[in-house]
Amino acid sequence: MEPALTAAAIPPAVGPGTNVVGYFAQSNTAGQVIVVVLIVLSLVAWTIMVGKYRDLRQLQSLNGHYERLLAKQRKLLDLDPDLPAESPYNALVQNALEAFYHYGADLSDPDTHRAALRMGHVENAMQRGVANQTVRYESKMVLLGSIVTGAPFLGLLGTVWGVMDAFGAMAGTGSASLQALAPGVSGALLTTVAGLLVAIPAAFGYNYLLQKSRIAIVELENFASLIADRIEMEAQAAAAGFL
């Protein structure tokens, strides 16, 4: 016959509070509010990360397509400056051409001083265009960075508040047992876990998207410099009668 199981050999039953829902129920009101806020921030962070990744890929594709079309264009100054801009590269070219033709459409003017003023106007317009597109590339990154920074602190606030309430309740009842303290502490620690679950993936996503944005901005600045050089060479060739 098999020996009877003793009470010590029987594993303890899992209590109702040993899961996330139970921990949430054991939290105080402030902790529950903070957890709900962190859930909302997590949804906002993931929405920003997915949307920003798609936006950067779309802008990169549009820029590459326009760059290939521009490489086939023999004369950059023949492009229509009033065409709508569909990509950041296209917008820069449109800004440059508008500034260039602001001084008139005569390309055979031999006046070097007037040509220098025209190119200075073009370069200023392209600098403004780069600044505008930089804002476009970096949009929503401040909000994502704020979530990365603020989520752990919200979690810590909920934990400290919950532990304070747990010790206060224990002092009020006069009970110093672990069974009286553990539920409140476990509920309080849930906010820290929630804050880290929000901040960790958001931090990785923020760093990745920030790096992608910075690379795109550097490429935009290099493209603007290239377009300025090309416009200047074509203008000089036209003034010399080669175009």
Image (tube, helix red, strand yellow):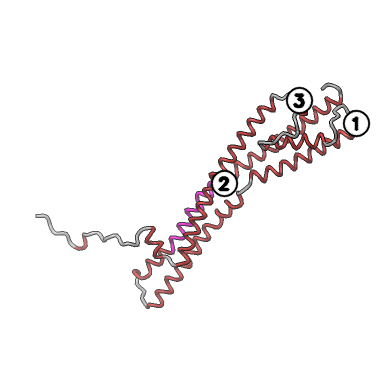
The residue under label 2 is 207
Q: Which residue is mark 1?
A: 111
Q: Is residue 82 left or right of residue 176?
A: right
Tell me how far mark 2 sits from mark 3, CA to CA: 40 Å
- Name the mark nearer the viewer: 2 or 3: 3
| 190 magenta-colored | yes
The answer to which of marks 3 and 1 sits earlier in the sequence is 3
Tell me which amino acid carries mark 1.
Answer: Asp
Q: Position of residue 120 (x, y in %)?
A: 82, 38
Q: Which amino acid type is shown beneath numbered disc 3?
A: Lys
| In this view, 161 is above or below 97 | below
Which label number is shown at residue 75? 3
What kind of secondary structure does the magenta stretch mostly adopt? helix
Please state if 108 lies on the left or on the right of 48 as rendered.
right
Q: Please rate how many residues cluster around mark 2, counting C-alpha atoms within 10 Å: few if below 14, some from 14 to 19, many from 20.
A: few
Give left or right: position of 86 versus 227: left
Quadrant (top left, top right, bottom left, bottom right) of the N terminus = bottom left
SS of the residue under disc 2? helix
Within the image, what quadrant is residue 178 found in? bottom left
Quadrant where the C terminus lies? top right
Mark nearer the viewer, 2 or 1: 1
Q: Is residue 116 left or right of residue 125?
A: right
